[in-house]
Each structure stands twice: as structure tokens, then as C-alpha cells.
Image (tube, rainbow, N blue to C red):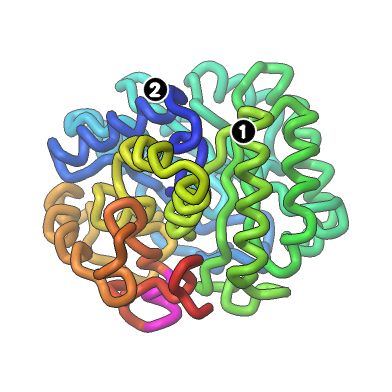
Amino acid sequence: MAHITTILKPGHPVGDLEKLCHQSKERCGIGEVLWLTTFRCNLRCSCCYTKSPREVKELSTKESVKFIHHLGELGVPIVFLSGGEPLLRNDIEVILKELHEIGIKVVLSTNGTLIDQKVASLAKETNVLYVALSLHGTKEIHDELTQVKGAFDKVVKGVEILKDYEIPICTKTVVTGMTYPYIPQVIDWSISSGIKAFYICDLVPAGRGCSAPGGRVGKAKWSALLDKIVFYVETEGIFVDIGAHPSTIPYVLEKIGAGDPEKVNMARKRVVDTACPVGQGFVGLMPDGGVSPCNFMPDLILGNIREKPIEEIINSFNESFNVVGESCVSCKWKDVCGGCRAKAFYMLGDAKKGDPTCLLYGNK
């Protein structure tokens, strides 16, 4: 999670949440949980790393509630509910209310097509931090990527409903050769709609992402996109989180340092943990209770909460990702970046190797 805004803008509220996650990691080994609640989905996105929809034996309502209460006992501050499509779970209301009642902050990550008055009311009642909705370009591009006609219009309708309930919205999009030309347009439309938070994720070559139309974009295009994102952050005051591309942080820091070395030192001090959260207290929880070091690695399961407490699983593997291959291990930015372990895993066959897509030293 590369929080571009918190290194550029001191005092952003997300910076306080980062510190809470760090404190939780130091206390119990877990800072945050991204819970893929289901692999069921009503879309067929060409970039989907989980190959949803597919069937697995999901955690039951009883198991889910037990897990939530255990996170509460551990003091974990935030859970991201994702999928698949989390709103397809019949017990999503129970899950949201349980998390709210024990004081865990929630980001509800949905494809946006199932937002209605009931969902918006539930999000309001449970004080959801953000509802994150997918938007990948124009109506034609979005519907082509999701492989469902009318998906774009449903997202736009969902945005209007959430705005009526004054629920914070985050626009999320995946950077591919297909979506790249439209990302500034997505940001502009979102800002004009009152949306001030964005999750912009690099394409992970897993699941259907291996054959996504247009594939990954290279360093030149990503660098140009980042320059635009920095401009938006500085002029529009938006919050931007870059997913699956931790080297965006050192890229931005080097750009800052080129003009003001003291400014980059101050910005670097605002980085709480490495931008790649693997081994830093981040947990990817699969629908069946499987635990992965990252949600982007659903094929790397290191235990199951049906068999062992989550903190025992996490503490058994956190340190194993501390030593990584070149060029990451000797990089001057390793303490703020860490390299993308998921892309090393899928592209090089070993999560401990260097990040082949690094914007500074990678070759992909």
C-alpha cells in the first residue's frame, strides 16, 4: 500500500491510521486484514487475480463472527472487506454490524453494481470508513473489462445513492494497457462527483490478470501517470493509495529530492512501514479461512484460521519475508518500499526475489 498522499501532505488522517496499524503489528503481529469474504461475483473482470467467480467452502456466519471477535481481542484497527463481491454474502449485514460494534474500522470494497438504498443505509449505520467502487474508464471500456453490459451505469447510480447518504467513496481502478489512457478521465469525473479518495492498482499477473487485454504498462507510462497523480494530490487535495506497486514511493521521493533534499528527508520520515505490506503485519484472508501474506497471492496459503489462531500463522511467516533478492535487498529505499512480493512470486516464481517491475531498477 503506497500512500502517496501521506508522504506529500503531512497531517492527513490516514497517517494516524497507519500509526495505529503499526502499533497493532508491534503488539500482536497483525496490523490490518484484507478479507476476501467470497469468490462469488456477478462480474467477470478480465483483470481479476482471484479468478472469481468460483466456489469454495466459505467461512460460515458463526465462524465469521468468531473471527471478528478474535480480531477485536487482538486490537486490530481495520479490516478491508473484499471479494469476489462481498455484497453477495447473505450475512454481510451481520459481518458489518459485528465489526462496527467492537470498534474495528471497515473499508467495504465492492464492484459497485449492487449498491442500493439498503446497502447505503447499512454502510451509514455501521460507519464504514469508505465504500470503494470500481471504475475503469468510459462506459464502453468499463463494460468491456467487466464483461457485463450495463455495469458502468450501475456504478454511477451507486455513487449517487452513496452521496445521498453522505458516505465517503473511494474510486478504485486497475492500470492496464486497456485502462491506462482513461485513468485521468476517471480521476476527473470522480473529483467532479465529490470523490476525494483513490485506489489505483497495478495489474497483478495472477488469475485472469495473466491474460488481461493490454497487459501491464511499463515504467515510462507508470512514471508519467505518477507525475499526474502527484499533481492531483498537490492541487486537488485527494488521497491516493497505489496498490501492488511499492516502488512508486521511492520514485516520488526521488522526484522530491531532485529539487529539495531536505524535503525528501522529511517526507521519508512520514513513511511508517514499507509500501509492500508483506511481512509487515498485513494479512490476506481467503473466503475459506486460508491465510496468505498478501491478498494478491491467493495461491500462497500458509495456514487456516479453522485450524490455528491467525496470529500464530502470521508470526510464523512475517520474518521470513525480511530478506529479499536483488535489486531489492541492497536498495537504499528498501526500508520504505520492500518491492512487490506478489509480482516476484508470480513473475519470478519466488516471493523473496527482487521486484521485476521496480520503477527505478526493474526490467519489466
In the image, is residue 220 part of the stretch drawn in magenta?
no
236 left or right of 64? Answer: right
Residue 234 numbered mark, or none: 1
The secondary structure type at the circle numbered 1 is: helix
Spatial CA distance of label 1 from label 2 is 33 Å
In front here: 249 or 256?
256
In front here: 97 or 205?
205
| Percent position of residue 102, x then y | 30, 22
On the question of residue 77 being in view, the answer is: yes
Q: Nearer the viewer, mark 1 or mark 2?
A: 1
The secondary structure type at the circle numbered 2 is: helix
| Percent position of residue 199, x then y | 57, 45
Name the residue located 53 percent from the left edge and 74 percent from the top edge. Answer: 205
Residue 100 numbered mark, or none: 2
Position of 234 relative to 103 (above/below): below
- Disc 2 crowd rating (10 Å Cα; few below 14, some 14-19, many 20+) is some
